[in-house]
Structures are given as C-alpha cells and as structure tokens.
Amino acid sequence: MPEGHTLHRLARRHRALFGGRPVAVSSPQGRFAAGAAAVDGMVLKRAEAHGKHLFHHYAPDRVVHVHLGLYGTFDEAPAPAPEPRGQVRMRMVGETAYADLRGATACELLTAAEARVIRARLGPDPLRRDADPERAWARVSRSRAPLATLLMDQAVVAGVGNVYRAETLFRHRLDPQLPGTALAREQWDALWADLVALMKDGVRRGRIDTVEKEHDPRRQGRAPRKDRHGGEVYVYRRAGMPCLVCGTPVAHTEHAARNLFWCPSCQRG
C-alpha cells in the first residue's frame, strides 16, 4: 500500500497539472459516474493529502475523496487523452495533461463536512503543516499496545506504513514490541522529528531512503538494493540478511496481518 509521501506527491502533482483551472472529470468505468458528473468542468481549487487519503476540492461543498488502498494508481501523461484502456475509475483532463485513476479502494464525492469527518478520524500527518504531534503522543503514552501496532494505526499517526514503521524503529533502536507506555518523551520527540525528515525526503525523491551515509552501499562495498519500493533501507524486506550495523540476521514475523522486520541485536527489548 502506498505510504503517506506518495499521496503528498500526488497532491502536489495534481495542483501543478490541474489546480486553478477547469477540469474535465469522467468515469469511463462507470462506478464514479454520478460523482464525476457533479464536478465535471469545475475549477480544481486545491488538492491536499492527509495520511493515505487524497482530497480534490472543486467548490465549497464538493470534494472528491480518493484512497488508493493496495492496488490504486494514478497514471498521468500529456494531453490529449487517448481512449481509456482498462478499468478507469476516474479520468481528469486538463489543458496540458490527463490522469487516470485505477484500482482505488475509494473514489467518492463528499461534502466538505463529510471530508472533515474523515480527517477528524485520522491522527496527525508528519507531512502536514497543521500536524500536532502532541495528539499522537497522548495516544501513544497512554497505550499498552506495542509500538509496531501504534505506528501503523492511522488514528495515531497518519501516513506511516510498513516501511516507515520498520525503518524509524530501527533508526532509533526501539524494540517493535515495546509498549507505548514504556516510551520516553524524548524518544517520542526524536521519533516524530525523524518521521518528518524521512517522509519529506520521500516526497522529494519519490522513494524511501533511510540509511545514513556510513551505511550507503558504495561505502560498504555492497550492491545497491533492488526492490520495486526502491531506496536503501536497514531492515524492511531484508529478512535473514545481515544487519547493516551489527551483522545480525534481520528478523521477520507477521504482526497484525502485516510483515514486521527488525534487528534482534540493535533493537533489544
């Protein structure tokens, strides 16, 4: 599933391609036909992301909400748009480009109030200027759930997925099973600041890179990582491989139906 930086990149891209101008919106697949017709030809006022949710604001009370889920993608190309191929849930056509949405979990027309309800259910997003880390700390510090659970809870921190969870816990040498109540305030402050920095870098690069310079493959004499997620990481999808810091084989288990990776030596309880 795309993590928060991907949605913020999409919001930024859509503002550049379509923002401030009328957009032709359609649903070749038909599943979003009524919603598309309601905003077709309207000016896209703004596009924003909160966690893994994307919001297109067309008017004071018309908002298109998109959640990509596991399989959703936006394909973009210069105009003119060709005949749609495959199951295109929503097509946006502007003056210079078009974008096709496929496979999304959600694509729906909401009122501004309904969009606020969705956002109210989400925790602070490290990539948003209005993020309040105190809200997340209040949830974490009172919870006996493990950090591995809390960081993936979108009501606690919005936008963090499997990669950012595994990597930030490793970077701060935190045991994934450590209860939230056992986390010190200074540890939380450092963790949040690191999430902000890493996710901003993800927006800029379009991939997740988490290793420090001294662990760069060129300095360690190892081959660069090859993975569809891209980026150099410490533990994510490196099960059984030596930890880049201590050499211990990276561990893997299933946690709350998701893959969890960590170093048993660097992240001792």
Image (cartoon, rainbow, N blue to C red):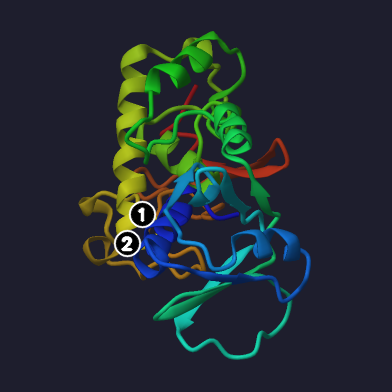
Establish if 94 lies above or below 242: below
| Residue 155, disc | none
| Residue 205, disc | 2
* Viewer-closest of 173 and 29: 29
Query: The N terminus appears in which quarter of the rendering?
Result: bottom right
Which residue appears at 50% of the width and 43% of the height? 60
Local SS, label 1 = helix
Q: CA distance from mark 1 to mark 2?
A: 5 Å
Query: Does the CB distance between marks 1 and 2 fall below 8 Å?
Result: yes
Q: Position of residue 99 (x, y in %)?
A: 52, 73
Judge the density around disc 2: few (<14), some (14-19), many (≥20) Cα neighbours within 10 Å: few
- Give the quarter of the image for residue 32: bottom right
Residue position marked by numbered label 1 in the rendering: 202
Judge the density around disc 1: few (<14), some (14-19), many (≥20) Cα neighbours within 10 Å: many
Which residue appears at 61% of the width and 30% of the height? 117
Establish if 78 lies above or below 3: below
Amino acid type for the residue under numbered disc 1? Gly
Local SS, label 2 = helix
Visible in this render: residue 231?
A: no
Visible in this render: residue 262?
A: yes
